[in-house]
Image: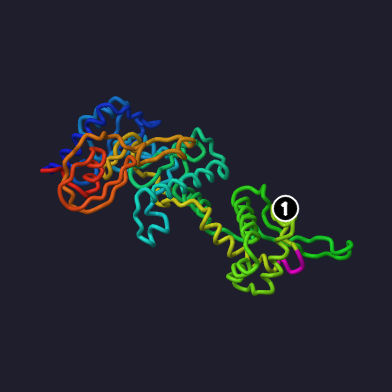
Amino acid sequence: MESKTASYLRSRFREYYLTASMDAPPGMESREWGFIFYDAPGMRRHRSFSSRKELVDYIRSTVPAHVYHSAAYYLKPDAPTMKEKIWKGADLIFDLDADHLSEYRVSGRRDYGEMLERVKRETMKLLEFLLSDFGFDEKRISVVFSGGRGYHIHVRDPSIMRLRSDARREIVDYLTGRGLDIGRFIYEIDVEGDAGVGRARSLRGPASDAPGWGNRINRAMESMVMHLRALDDEEAISLLKRVDGIGPQKAGRFLSRIREENAINKIRAGNLDFFKYASGTWKLIIPYLMEESVRALSGETDEPVTADVHRLIRFPESLHGGTGLRVTQLTIDSLRAFDPLRDAVVFGDDPVSVEVIRPTTLELMGERFDLIDGRAELPAYAAVFLMARGFAEIGR
């Protein structure tokens, strides 16, 4: 039997769905659809729809708590097994969720607004990889706020449609810098010795116009040098000494040369031989710097989602049954200004009586609610969010 709270949420969701446009994704008739309902366990999947009208009518009549469609395209999307569906290809999907970010996994911090802002920055960083390193056309990329704790990126490009799981994992490996080899970026070349006599070895790194990770590593080197130059000598030397193998003398010599006027230009050109024995110092710094760069610059995404060519993903313009927020489709340009705690809210501010069962603090639509156990009257948007999250029940 459906609870009063679930019944209330379903009635509010119905109000939304009766007016929502719900544009269908490309190739909707070849996609599998899945639904989770408030009054039934598990997911009802292996559904297909031949038209947008058929899909919208189904959602409006059944009012699901969650709506999903496959990233894949099938010959028979409603077949009961994957083998029978006959896979034709799949969008490339990236799922960025706050729970996948290392600082939240380790610290357990759970400020909702802060998490959403942090994961949005990761999403923009990943988009830079897709546009610059992979060269995908912006028109073939769709960004979607999940309605929960993050964002989905859909790449619909013919070049990746038929890629299998192993190839998609390799894309994730590149994005996360997994297996990045220092030897591909830092190397020695033969140069003429002093006065043209003999030959010597000179250390080179990626230049500022290098593609992909080379460009990012060059930016990291330049950023490190600029940071050291801004510190006083004692602070800069102390920072350099954190690198294994660098003592006070080596740190002081390195610092004095990177303070020279042309040091930044040399780094941008990929020339790391600032002075005699500079190569040895850089060889100690660069592995440390690359590790930090990978941590700071790599895209963070849920690898199983990207690798799974049968994955179901949330349907844009549906509601997230765990928050009541809209799964919101965005352009790359609109992502930066998007505020999910305002722009994904669909319910109004009519007062609703609730019973708070778990004390919490909520910030939504620019308002802050500090709630303790017991009865409270809240605007509908806050009441729906708390009930969907399990922090409150409809008032008796």
Left or right side of 292 for 105: left
Marker count (numbered): 1
User: Between 74 and 71, which is closer to the camera in this rendering?
Assistant: 71
Left or right side of 214 for 71: left
Residue 121 at x, y percent in the picture:
47, 47
Residue 45 seen in the current view: no
Residue 139 at x, y percent in the picture:
50, 32
Left or right side of 126 for 71: left
User: Residue drawn 54% across and 60% down?
Assistant: 292
User: Between 229 and 124, which is closer to the camera in this rendering?
Assistant: 229
User: Residue drawn 24% across and 46% down?
Assistant: 386
User: Residue drawn 55% across and 43% down?
Assistant: 134
278 in the magenta segment: yes
Q: How is the image coloured?
A: rainbow
User: Residue drawn 23% across and 37% down?
Assistant: 380
> In which quarter of the view is residue 102 placed?
bottom left
Q: Which residue is mark 1?
A: 265
Q: Which residues are magenta?
A: 275-279
The kind of residue on which mark 1 rests is: Asn
Residue 293 at x, y percent in the picture:
56, 57
71 in the magenta segment: no
Looking at the image, is 68 positioned above or below residue 389? above
> In which quarter of the view is residue 71 placed?
top left
Quarter of the rendering occupied by the N terminus: top left
Element type at marker 1? helix
